[in-house]
Image: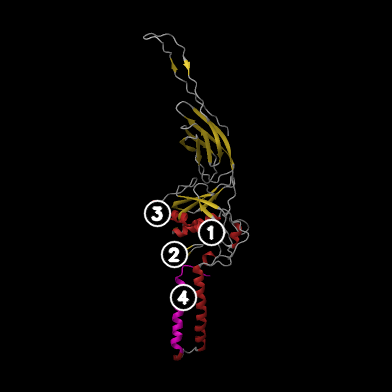
Amino acid sequence: MALATLVVGCAAPTIPDASPGIGTSSPGAVATAAITPLPLSVTEVKYGALSVRTAPGVRCNASLQIAGGYYGDVPPGSLPEQSAGADGLISWTYPTPRIPAGTGAYTANCQNSTATETKSGNFTIPTHPIVATSLTVRVTTELPPREQFNPDPSLVPLRDSSFARIKETLATEWKAATRGLGSLQIDDAAADITMYVVASRGTSVHRSTSSDDSQDIVIYVSDQVLGRRTVENNVAVALHELGHIWCCHGPDANETGHWVTKQASPGLYGVDKYGLMTDPVTCVSFGAVLSCPNRFSDREMAALGFTNFPPPAPDPCITQVLSLQSQLNSLGAQITAIEAQYPRGIPSSIYDSYVAMVNQYNSLVSRRNALPCDAS
């Protein structure tokens, strides 16, 4: 990128010579005062930082020319004015979202009361692969670029509460979803990917383009079909869309990046047993609670880049359901045996204990059914 620099010089005032005589004047030579050049040097320049050194008290600002990707954030186009301290040093730092590799340009403009100076140059913009073991995410309620939708003011409270919950819990949920192997940080300055949380109805989406490897995520807090989600559901949706950074491809996947064949994963139960990335993603209602998948399956762990991974950590709710089911199986077998032994009626000598077992069985069923998880 060629940059043209325009340097403006200021002419010095002319001062007439004063005559030594009182009340008289004589022709004098007109002298032009020399302008002292403004010192300006660039001491550091890289993607995310620019430093210059000049004279104390000099005011400087800077502009940046950085081409972002088709999707995602772009760094700022200008850096604010600062005044140099006693050492003459001025430093700027600015956000560095992941953008396509290339070359950026800067222009630093400095001035004092008598002079101006400009320095321009280029710097390299690196890029890097996004990895599940060290993922950085910026979560924002800003409107996503290049996305057509109708904002719904009635969904703003749900957007704000979902935004807050995602920022608060996404790192923990990511670690749990990846069996303790994944690491995620919320980072507004140097994010791998930006997640836009939108007060609207729509289909949440991971947007990407192969032309420059740029990508971002749009989370609609209300689904077009299922309607308003809870904040917990929106956290699960955020995990699902993050999974699309790597998943899913191959003969078992479709063009939208979802598995078209369901494959149960050992150690996962209920809504989680097929993982997070099937099409469609299936949620289950437990009374007022809508439970959606939030654990990656074995084949999804492999798609995320994990070659060795442990079995899923036990879910406390599932553990409790399995324990209750084991008790039900044992108690049910005893009840069935008694009924088989006395097909014409339970003898009075054991009737009270039989009834107690039936009552205990029904109580265990109620407790199992009240738990918001499915151990199938």
Q: Which residue is under mark 4?
A: 365
Residue 368 sits inside the magenta stretch: yes
CB atoms of marks 3 and 1 within 8 Å: no
- On whether residue 170 falls in the magenta region, the answer is no
Marks 3 and 1, the one that precedes in the sequence: 3
Say if residue 232 shows up in the picture.
yes
Q: CA distance from mark 4 to mark 2?
A: 19 Å
Main SS category, magenta section: helix
Q: Label 1: state its secondary structure.
A: helix
Residue at image mark 1: 175
Q: Is residue 374 visible?
A: no
For residue 153, side relative to residue 49 (left or right): left
Provide the secondary structure element on which disc 4 rests: helix
Position in image of residue 67 (x %, y %): 55, 40
Q: Residue at x 50, y 38 (%)?
A: 91
Q: Distance from label 4 to label 1 (Cα)?
A: 33 Å
* Image position, residue 41 (x, y; %): 54, 32
**SS label for mark 3:** helix
Q: Return the residue found at the far left.
A: 23
In the image, residue 67 sits, relative to residue 279, either above or below, namely above
Foreground residue, 271 or 223?
A: 271
Picture disc at residue 157: 3
Task: Tell me which segment is drawn in magenta.
Answer: 350-376
The residue at 44%/77% (across/down) is 363
Depth-wise, is mark 1 or mark 2 nearer the camera? Answer: 1
The alpha-carbon separation of the residues under discs 3 and 2 comes to 19 Å
Task: Name the one closer to the observer, 346 or 226.
Answer: 346
Rendered residue at 44%/54% (across/down):
164
Q: Earlier in the sequence, mark 4 or mark 2?
A: 2
Query: Spatial distance from mark 1 to mark 2, Cα to Cα?
Result: 23 Å
Residue under pointer 2: 289
**Three-letter amino acid code at the position of disc 2:** Val
